Amino acid sequence: MAEAADHARDFPGIGSLPDRPIRIILAPTRETYDSLTRGRLPLWSQGAAFPDAGTIVLLTAHPPSGPSALRHELAHLALRWHVGRHVPLWFEEGYAAVAAQEWDRLDALRLNWQLARGVRMDLDDVDRALRGARGDAETGYALAATAVLLLQRWGGERGLAPLLANLPQAESFDAALRATYHVTEGDFELRWQRDVGSRYGWLSWLAAMGFFWLSIGALLAALVLLRRRRDQRKRAALEAELLDELEITE
């Protein structure tokens, strides 16, 4: 774990972590984890980063506490140390999810019925979801990642580097967006909502559900075929047994 942290690099728009000490604490139980984080995190939380203290706490009682979980928390340190202050929660969590390449979160959005039927969440809704129950938080993480990925696409070959170059000097996140992309935070929110709607709307949901039912249909067809073959073998064996009993030969 410590070696992985030492070799962590290629954080989007930032590069490597600065040469600063990092303490990683592994909590073997939920009780220990809650004690170390002072009980301020939701019950589904399995990792926490404290940039000011240069500390990461990981719950090791469950499998997710692995390389991806560590890199997610290291990304929080990289972002805060680079910017020097808090940025919107959706950007912090979306950046960490993208840096850790948690693409499975995006797959879940394709089956999200709320998005499929056109329900729009704004960025404040995403922040609230990230602080909510596990199901809401999972959607929040995924949507936060889509917002950061949109900003990354706008950066072209440089990705998030232009935005992250402006953030430390900008008066606010909105000011950094203006300086980098010439849009306000409100403009970005509207464009992000349209992007999410086009990528995870009802067509995407139907496609994902179609694949699901196609897979179920293929499985059922295979099971029916296997059962028919088994029944044929049973009938053949029964007929052979009856012929033997009647002492009939061909």
Image: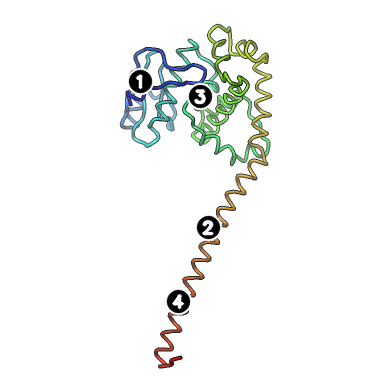
Give the percent coordinates (x, y) of residue 224.
Answer: 53, 65
Q: Where, by quadrant of the figure, is residue 242 drawn?
A: bottom left
Q: Which residue is mark 2?
A: 219
Q: Where, by quadrant of the figure, is residue 91 drawn?
A: top right
Viewer-proximal residue among 28 and 178: 178
Q: Amino acid at mark 3?
A: Glu
Residue at the image position 46 percent from the left and 79 percent from the top: 236
Q: Amino acid at mark 2?
A: Leu
**Tag 4 and tag 3, C-beta contact below 8 Å:** no
Residue at the image position 51 percent from the left and 31 percent from the top: 137
Q: SS for tag 2?
A: helix
Mark 2 or mark 3: name the one nearer the start of the chain. Answer: 3
Classify 10 Å Cα crowding around label 2: few (below 14), some (14-19), many (20 and above).
Answer: few
In this rendering, position of residue 142 left or right of residue 7: right
Classify 10 Å Cα crowding around label 1: few (below 14), some (14-19), many (20 and above).
Answer: few
Viewer-proximal residue among 157 and 247: 157
- Which label sits on residue 126? none
Q: Amino acid at mark 1?
A: Asp
Q: Quadrant of the N terminus?
A: top left
